[in-house]
């Protein structure tokens, strides 16, 4: 069935306009008001206020267990990424780590004399001592050597090159000298060439230089004798449970002794979920990575292969979701069926979900507004100040800093996962009062997330106004649409990760290439007469210098709201380009989205602790949820679960049955029934969404309920 036909307004939608007009977008409070309010973020605060259809929703609990939210990445070839094997690739036999001791086959002590002429007697003797320790195979006490302070950058580069040329088993980097001295070159023994960090060296904090950058792990860029027939990147599938992408890669990087930026991936995944995605790493052996599986908790790696190019942000089609809503309650089964079928048929407003704006009581878009205004101290304080809903230890650390300003004490108390807070404090310790520099110390993508969040905030409000005022049944004069004549593929904003330069920044390089900006056009009267565009084609801009706004009153939403927040969308009020919308290209995003390959089924269950969906790990272990339930029943003395003859029909969107009819019928699986416990109902959904579309917004359309954390907690109570 054509998409336009699916969106033709049935009689039931005739009254939608009046329904949407009653929903007024609400501007969230200014930063100064937020802390006093101390309330959790809710959907209307960020412009999420409309629905596509008037089909009634029902009660259902989202993410009661993290296993109820399964995410599998979908690559550019539209193949779903699964963890399917822990086997090493055949090519691994060709990648051999050096078996000979690093000191064999060459008289390195004669090279020390050349080093003496470069760096002097003191450093030469230090290097000689380090070589003697290695040659004697001393275990566990081969500490790095920090050379004499060296203020000349060109000379330090010469030293680095000397070691690279003459000592393949050493890793060098530049660090701050102790007690405020000039920068120094540090030399560290790498026991396995190309294998990452040494397993012998001490931690940096043990070498006696208290001001060294303790948090920066070494990054061995791989062996120089890497086989030419193999790709330089090891690609693997990362499976993780209840961990976000950065956290999981941080654990793996620490175990391998490499920097987190050495990993490449296409997009981040929800923390409270079970997810599988592709990751690449430069010149690492599959054997080393596979060996970590026995030591990893809630993380597994597999499906190894060598490729020529590493992954970068945005290089994915989207994600496949398997979502289980528990505790489903409705007036009747027909209500559930109608709502489930309606989601596949009608789609949803493609809002940025609440995850985009942070989970704390200080939303990220408020910090972004402060950055756009050039209020550096205010922005830093919003990141550092106490907030509701955090662990007592974190809150105490924040309160302590706000009252006493003791940076050292606060850094000791703050957990390391609070990257932005720690980066700001560490910079303020070195440069008191330089709040702009402190904000720039935050990893690039994390700090840019704040400004991008403000763009998303404006987009959400504009989308709500468009639906409220003009409905979803037609395109109107002045709407923006992707040109039908253009073959350019839509490029949407992608989830924020941690790129190290502009080439990985999805907003500056991948998300908004110039040719796609030109593929957007303004609907004119001739287009309306031809009728070639539908509401599915309508897009709205993310503010930036390379976009244009709708040629109707929806454009006023952007400028009016920005003006109230003291933000200019046309000119910069400060010289920090990265915190200026005029330095961003901007982009476009579809207002409407329909789930792809959509299926659903109703399940009955009794035990909230039993998983209702199969994970990649279940498949590998040949242990499916049904098997787990049988074991539970046997353990409870109920060897034969009663069957449930309740049936439902599922809707399959974007597929046509062999007989030409839309959709299909799904037999409900009877999961569990017991005399001891009352049977409960769950709705399991499967669908694919393009990158940057939020599954939570699809669930919101289905349930007609808020997806806020506070609301979901009341559902779980």
Image: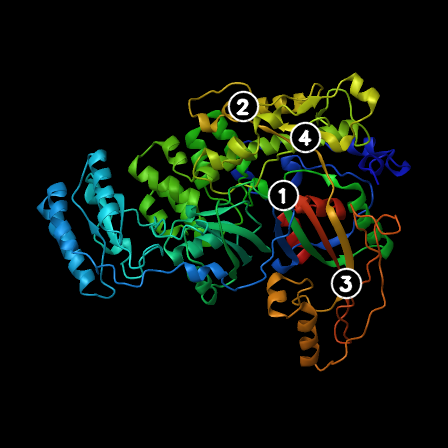
In the image, 598: left or right of 557?
right
Badge 4 is on which residue? 487
Badge 3 is on which residue? 603
Farthest residue, direction bottom = 637
Q: Residues within 10 Å of mark 1 (few under 14, many from 20)?
A: many
Disc 3 is placed on an element classified as strand
Badge 1 is on which residue? 317
Classify 682 as above or below 353.
below
At horizontal 27% and vertical 53% (from top left) the residue drawn is 204
Q: Residue 98: x and y, percent?
A: 32, 60
Quadrant holding the N terminus: top right
What is the CA distance from the residue labelled 3 to the residue labelled 4? 42 Å
Residue 566 bears which disc, if any?
A: 2
Disc 2 is placed on an element classified as loop
Q: Nearer the viewer, mark 1 or mark 4?
A: 4
What is the CA distance from the residue labelled 2 to the residue labelled 3? 51 Å
């Amino acid at each position: 069935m054509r998409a336009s036909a699916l969106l033709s307004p049935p009689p039931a939608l005739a009254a939608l306009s009046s329904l949407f007009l009653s929903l007024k977008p609400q501007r969230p409070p200014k930063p100064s008001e937020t802390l006093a309010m101390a309330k959790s973020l809710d959907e209307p605060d960020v412009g999420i206020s409309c629905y596509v259809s008037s089909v009634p929703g029902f009660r259902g609990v989202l993410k009661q267990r993290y296993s109820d939210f399964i995410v599998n990445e979908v690559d550019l070839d539209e193949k779903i990424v699964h963890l399917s094997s822990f086997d090493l690739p055949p090519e691994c036999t060709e990648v051999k780590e050096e078996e000979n001791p690093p000191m064999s086959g060459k008289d390195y002590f004669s090279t020390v004399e050349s080093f003496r002429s470069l760096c002097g007697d003191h450093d030469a003797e230090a290097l000689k001592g380090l070589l003697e320790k290695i040659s004697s195979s001393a275990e566990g006490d081969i500490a790095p050597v920090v050379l004499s302070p060296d203020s000349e950058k060109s000379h330090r580069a010469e030293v680095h090159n000397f070691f690279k040329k003459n000592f393949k088993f050493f890793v060098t980097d530049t660090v701050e000298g102790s007690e405020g001295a000039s920068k120094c070159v540090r030399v560290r023994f790498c026991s396995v060439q190309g294998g990452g960090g040494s397993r012998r060296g001490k931690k940096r904090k043990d070498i006696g230089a208290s001001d060294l950058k303790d948090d920066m792990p070494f990054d061995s860029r791989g062996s120089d004798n890497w086989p030419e027939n193999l790709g330089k990147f090891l690609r693997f599938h990362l499976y993780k449970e209840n961990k976000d992408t950065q956290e999981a890669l941080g654990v793996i990087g620490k175990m391998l002794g490499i920097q987190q930026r050495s990993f490449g991936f296409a997009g981040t995944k929800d923390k409270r979920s079970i997810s599988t995605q592709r990751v690449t790493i430069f010149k690492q052996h599959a054997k080393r990575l596979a060996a970590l599986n026995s030591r990893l908790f809630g993380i597994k790696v597999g499906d190894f292969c060598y490729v020529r190019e590493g992954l970068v942000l945005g290089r994915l089609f989207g994600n496949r979701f398997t979502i289980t809503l528990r505790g489903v309650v409705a007036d009747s089964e027909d209500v559930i069926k109608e709502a489930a079928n309606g989601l596949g048929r009608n789609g949803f407003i493609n809002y940025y979900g609440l995850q985009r704006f942070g989970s704390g009581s200080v939303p990220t878009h408020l910090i972004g507004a402060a950055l756009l205004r050039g209020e550096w101290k205010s922005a830093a304080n919003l990141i550092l100040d106490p907030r509701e809903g955090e662990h007592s230890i974190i809150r105490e650390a924040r309160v302590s800093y706000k009252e006493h300003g003791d940076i050292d004490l606060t850094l000791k108390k703050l957990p390391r996962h609070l990257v932005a807070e720690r980066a700001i404090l560490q910079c303020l310790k070195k440069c008191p009062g330089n709040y702009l520099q402190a904000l720039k110390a935050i990893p690039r993508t994390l700090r840019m997330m704040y400004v991008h969040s403000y763009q998303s905030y404006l987009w959400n409000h504009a989308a709500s106004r468009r639906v409220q005022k003009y409905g979803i049944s037609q395109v109107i004069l002045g709407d923006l649409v992707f040109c039908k004549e253009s073959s350019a593929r839509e490029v949407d904003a992608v989830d924020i990760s941690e790129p190290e330069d502009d080439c990985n920044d999805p907003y500056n390089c991948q998300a908004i290439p110039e040719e796609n900006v030109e593929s957007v056009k303004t609907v004119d009267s001739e287009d309306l007469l031809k009728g070639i565009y539908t509401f599915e084609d309508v897009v709205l801009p993310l503010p930036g210098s390379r976009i244009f706004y709708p040629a109707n009153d929806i454009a006023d939403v952007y400028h009016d709201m920005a003006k109230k927040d003291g933000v200019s969308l046309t000119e910069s009020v400060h010289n920090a380009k990265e915190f200026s919308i005029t330095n961003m290209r901007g982009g476009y995003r579809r207002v409407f989205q329909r789930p792809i390959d959509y299926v659903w089924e109703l399940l009955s269950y009794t035990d909230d602790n039993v998983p209702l969906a199969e994970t990649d790990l279940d498949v590998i272990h040949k242990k499916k949820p049904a098997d787990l339930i049988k074991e539970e029943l046997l353990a409870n003395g109920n060897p034969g679960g009663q069957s449930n003859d309740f049936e439902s029909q599922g809707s399959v969107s974007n597929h046509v049955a062999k007989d030409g009819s839309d959709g299909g019928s799904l037999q409900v699986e009877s999961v569990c029934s017991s005399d001891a416990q009352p049977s409960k109902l769950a709705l399991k959904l499967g669908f694919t969404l393009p990158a940057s579309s939020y599954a939570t917004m699809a669930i919101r359309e289905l349930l007609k309920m808020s997806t806020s954390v506070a609301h979901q907690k009341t559902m779980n109570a």
